[in-house]
Image (tube, helix red, strand yellow):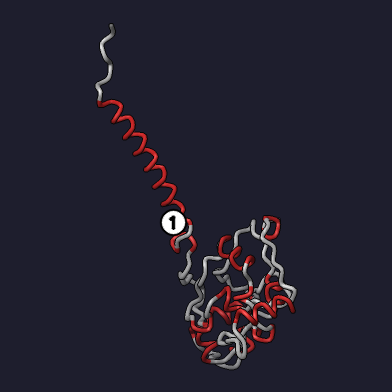
């Protein structure tokens, strides 16, 4: 009769080891999931460093400049677009003309070299997104970009992740507004609830967003 190779406690240790390994794997996966959807990864709420400090709060809230004055292609292009320097110089050729603060703007205009702004709302290359169709369907600037008119430096209000986009595609009514109010950051529905308005506009604007893979990955 062979001598026993393992003590009776070996079975207990084996079971405990399996449980610990499974717990460790689960913890690592859970941590990875939390990190992937956290502001650390998405850079949500992070004001990005720009070559020139541009305050939307000053230009929009204080000066009353409307979004489409600078972002002229929001209603017809796939991209909202970053304003060219000559748009800035429309005003700054007459005001703050000698300000050292705007030296880079004047230099860009004189040399015909674009300012290298850092895109804040920058989707991955494998994501297809058409800005114009969202505007035409009644999705306002505020829904995706947040209260930009209050931002001294622009940051991402939302994750812009796939889950966030799918939530809206599957239930767009809360984010719909009249096309005439697309750029109005202070707009609120009047005379009807958002649910009533959203349902009416979804029918009027023929809002029927898809949630299949091809919609965003082409």
Q: Nearer the viewer, residue 59 or 25?
A: 25
Task: State the residue at coordinates (37%, 38%).
Answer: 21
Left or right position of 212 against 189: right
Task: State the residue at coordinates (30%, 27%).
Answer: 11
Task: State the residue at coordinates (71%, 68%).
Answer: 208
Q: Quadrant of residue 2?
A: top left
Question: Tag 1's secondary structure?
Answer: helix
Residue topped by disc 1: 34
Q: Nearer the viewer, residue 9 or 60?
A: 9
Q: Quadrant of residue 104?
A: bottom right
Residue at the top extreme of this rendering: 1
Give x and y (percent) for residue 188.
Answer: 57, 87
Give x and y (percent) for residue 167.
Answer: 58, 65
Is residue 48 positioned above or below 194 on the image? above
Q: Quadrant of residue 88?
A: bottom right
Quarter holding the C terminus is bottom right
Quarter holding the N terminus is top left
């Amino acid at each position: 009769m062979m001598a026993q190779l393992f003590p009776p406690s070996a079975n207990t240790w084996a079971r405990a080891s399996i449980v610990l390994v499974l717990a460790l794997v689960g913890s690592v996966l859970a941590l990875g999931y939390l990190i992937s959807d956290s502001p650390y990864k998405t850079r949500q709420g992070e004001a990005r460093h720009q070559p020139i400090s541009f305050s939307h709060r000053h230009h929009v809230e204080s000066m009353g400049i409307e979004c489409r004055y600078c972002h002229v292609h929001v209603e017809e292009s796939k991209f909202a677009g970053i304003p060219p320097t000559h748009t800035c110089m429309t005003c700054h050729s007459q005001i703050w003309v000698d300000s050292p603060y705007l030296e880079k703007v004047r230099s860009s205009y004189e040399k015909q070299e674009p300012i290298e702004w850092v895109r804040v709302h920058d989707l991955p290359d494998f994501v297809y997104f058409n800005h114009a169709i969202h505007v035409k369907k009644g999705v306002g600037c505020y829904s995706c970009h947040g209260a930009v008119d209050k931002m001294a430096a622009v940051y991402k209000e939302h994750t812009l992740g796939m889950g966030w986009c799918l939530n809206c595609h599957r239930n767009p009514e809360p984010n719909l507004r009249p096309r005439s109010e697309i750029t109005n950051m202070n707009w609120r529905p009047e005379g009807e609830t958002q649910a009533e308005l959203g349902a009416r506009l979804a029918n009027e604007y023929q809002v029927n967003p898809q949630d299949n893979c091809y919609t965003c990955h082409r």
